[in-house]
Amino acid sequence: MFVLLFRYVFGSAIPIEGIDYASFLLPGILCQTVIFGATVTGGALAEDLQKGLIDRFRSLPMRSGAVLIGRTVADQVLNVISIVVMLLTGLAVGWRPHTSIGEFVLGIVVLLAFAFAISWLMAPVGLLVRTPEVVNNASFIVIFPLTFIANTFVPTENFPAPLRVFADWNPVSTATQAVRDLFGNTVPGPTPDAWSLQHPVVYTLIWVVIILAAFVPFAVSQYKRAAGR
């Protein structure tokens, strides 16, 4: 729906110099989709707690991190399905990759790595809040502006100065830019001023490492507390 809405309703009003809007749009939509898909992790864990499923796992001979790993990996499978649907929709509306197969696959890997990190970020939220509706509402309040104050749908050149600085260093922007570069959908023109957009793949992977390093131990610790271990 977002692809069709932005491509045909808003696309004619958002000209991007040097590239058609479908090519500019799809990497941003892909990034937004996998981020919203990753928030399912928190809601699902909260629901498992609410229904007593975590209490049942407590009696099984399994590692504390097994449930979290299973949940985050399962959500990655859903993200892969979403990406396939989005790519097919993109092809239908005129998007085309202009790169090698290796770079294209690397773009998908970067996208999934970023989504995987967001899943682990949301896991302790679900374990702390324990109410799926609250998790979903809270994550929407945070993630919705992050995905729009970015280069997902429009270039950041015309943003007000404070918003542009935020958008250029926003990891959602760099993940989107990384996918654009690897898909061959980069907007022609001068090199961006921000280092984050000059090296978007590196900057995005740095964020992935930071999020995983911080939130994997935190999520496992919170799971042990929730499960009474």
Image (cartoon, rainbow, N blue to C red):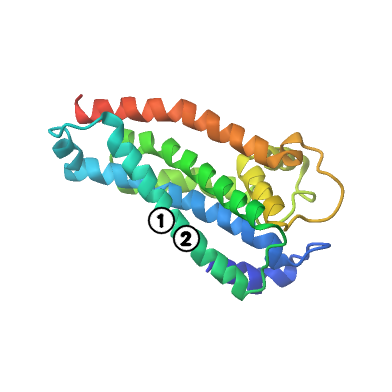
Disc 1 and disc 2: Cα gap in Å? 6 Å
Image height check: is 217 above or below 132?
above
- Residue, x 66% and y 41% (percent of image)? 201
- Can the viewer see residue 145? no
Tell me residue 34's x, y (percent). Answer: 50, 52
> How many numbered markers are drawn?
2
Q: Which one is in front, 203 or 10?
A: 203
In which quadrant will I find the C terminus? Answer: top left
Q: Which residue is mark 1?
A: 78
Taking the view exactly as shown, the residue that stands out farthest to the right is: 190
Q: Which one is in front, 19 or 102?
A: 102
Q: Which one is in front, 145 or 116?
A: 116
**Left or right, residue 37 beside residue 54:** right
- Residue, x 68% and y 42% (percent of image)? 167
Q: Quadrant of residue 81?
A: bottom left
Q: Which residue is mark 2?
A: 82
**Left or right, residue 135 beside residue 55:** right
Tell me residue 106's x, y (percent). Answer: 61, 49
Tell me residue 198's x, y (percent). Answer: 76, 40
Characterize the local packing of mark 2: few (<14), some (14-19) or many (20 or more) Cα atoms within 10 angstroms.
some
Tell me residue 130's x, y (percent). Answer: 28, 39
Q: Amino acid at mark 2?
A: Ser
Determine the secondary structure under disc 2.
helix
Characterize the local packing of mark 1: few (<14), some (14-19) or many (20 or more) Cα atoms within 10 angstroms.
some
- Residue, x 41% and y 30% (percent of image)? 216
Determine the secondary structure under disc 1.
helix
Query: Residue 188: which numbered mark, if any?
Result: none
- Can the viewer see residue 68? yes
Tell whether label 2 touches label 1 (CB within 8 Å): yes
Q: Amino acid at mark 1?
A: Leu
